[in-house]
């Protein structure tokens, strides 16, 4: 189906483990983004990508790594998970620089214990 | 830097009453502005967007917003609240050269019967 999908929907992991959150979009949008949502903070940008093989840090990048070898995929990796990374993570894509809007995935609720 | 401020983290209205959710932005360039709605445990759904066309923007579910450059505001309104409007609402603006969205911290709307 067309759209933007995130997996897994829910994840529980232990402190110190590596975990990867997946994001896949079917529109061939150039821009993709990762946000985290925390109570009292709204949504904050972790990383973004303007095209395949082009990524850059957002507001809160520490402890995260991204890659974008293919236009449609934009995985987010927590190299060594910490409890402060317990959050809801949203992936988004945009066909341009916002003039066509942004579409969000359903989110991944990550709990680090 | 671009910023978005939502006035009021919680707004409560009676069913049938006017809904007014306030949003102000800071920008040195004409912005793209968005309102999203988030229902519990769900992703973000686009309500409406302003991308430099008509200043009064109509969205889904009877919502509309007016872009006022002189006031740097983009308030969201609905003439008559419905119980199903209870959700969290986020105002967002496209950030500078990164092309990402910058979010306000959200306003939780409660609708009383």
Image (spheres, grey):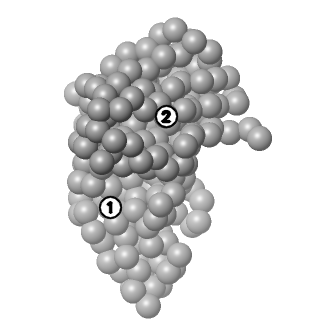
Q: Residue furthest top?
A: A53
Marks 2 and 1: CB-CB under 8 Å?
A: no
Number of numbered markers = 2
Residue at (25% x, 63% y) in the render: B9
State the residue position of label 1. Answer: B107
Residue A21's disc number: 2
Residue A84 percent coordinates (x, y): 23, 42
In the rendered image, the vertical position of residue A66 relative to residue B65, given as above or below: above
Is A36 on the left-hand or right-hand side of A29? left
Is A5 on the left-hand or right-hand side of B50? right
In the rendered image, the vertical position of residue A92 relative to residue A71, given as above or below: below
Is B54 on the left-hand or right-hand side of B104? right
Q: Chain of mark 1?
A: B
| B77 vs A31, nearest the viewer | A31
Q: Report the Cα–Cα distance between label 2 and label 1.
A: 28 Å
In the rendered image, the vertical position of residue B87 relative to residue B57, given as above or below: below
On whether disc 2 and disc 1 are found on a single subunit, the reply is no
Residue at (69% x, 29% y) in the render: A27
Pointer 2 local density, CA inside 10 Å: few below 14, some 14–19, many at least 20? many
Residue at (47% x, 10% y) in the render: A54
Q: Chain of mark 2?
A: A
Quadrant assignment, res A2 = top right
Residue A87 percent coordinates (x, y): 34, 47
Quarter of the image with the N terminus of chain A is top right
């Amino acid at each position: 189906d067309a759209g933007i999908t995130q997996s897994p929907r829910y994840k529980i992991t232990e402190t110190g483990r590596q975990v990867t959150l997946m994001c896949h979009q079917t529109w061939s949008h150039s821009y993709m983004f990762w946000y985290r949502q925390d109570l009292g903070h709204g949504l904050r940008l972790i990383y973004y990508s303007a095209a395949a093989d082009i990524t850059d840090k957002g507001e809160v990048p520490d402890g995260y790594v991204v890659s974008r070898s293919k236009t449609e995929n934009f995985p987010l990796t927590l190299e060594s998970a910490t409890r402060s990374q317990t959050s809801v993570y949203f992936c988004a894509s945009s066909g341009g620089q916002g003039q066509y809007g942004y579409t969000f995935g359903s989110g991944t609720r990550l709990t680090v214990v | 830097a671009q910023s978005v401020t939502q006035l009021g983290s919680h707004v409560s209205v009676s069913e049938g009453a006017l809904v007014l959710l306030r949003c102000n932005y800071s920008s040195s360039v004409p912005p793209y502005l968005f309102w999203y709605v988030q229902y519990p445990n769900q992703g973000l759904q686009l309500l409406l967007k302003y991308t430099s066309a008509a200043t009064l923007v109509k969205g889904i579910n009877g919502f509309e917003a007016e872009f006022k450059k002189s006031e740097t505001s983009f308030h969201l309104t609905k003439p008559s609240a419905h119980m199903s409007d209870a959700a969290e609402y986020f105002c967002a603006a496209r950030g500078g050269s990164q092309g990402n969205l910058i979010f306000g911290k959200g306003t939780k709307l409660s609708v009383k019967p």
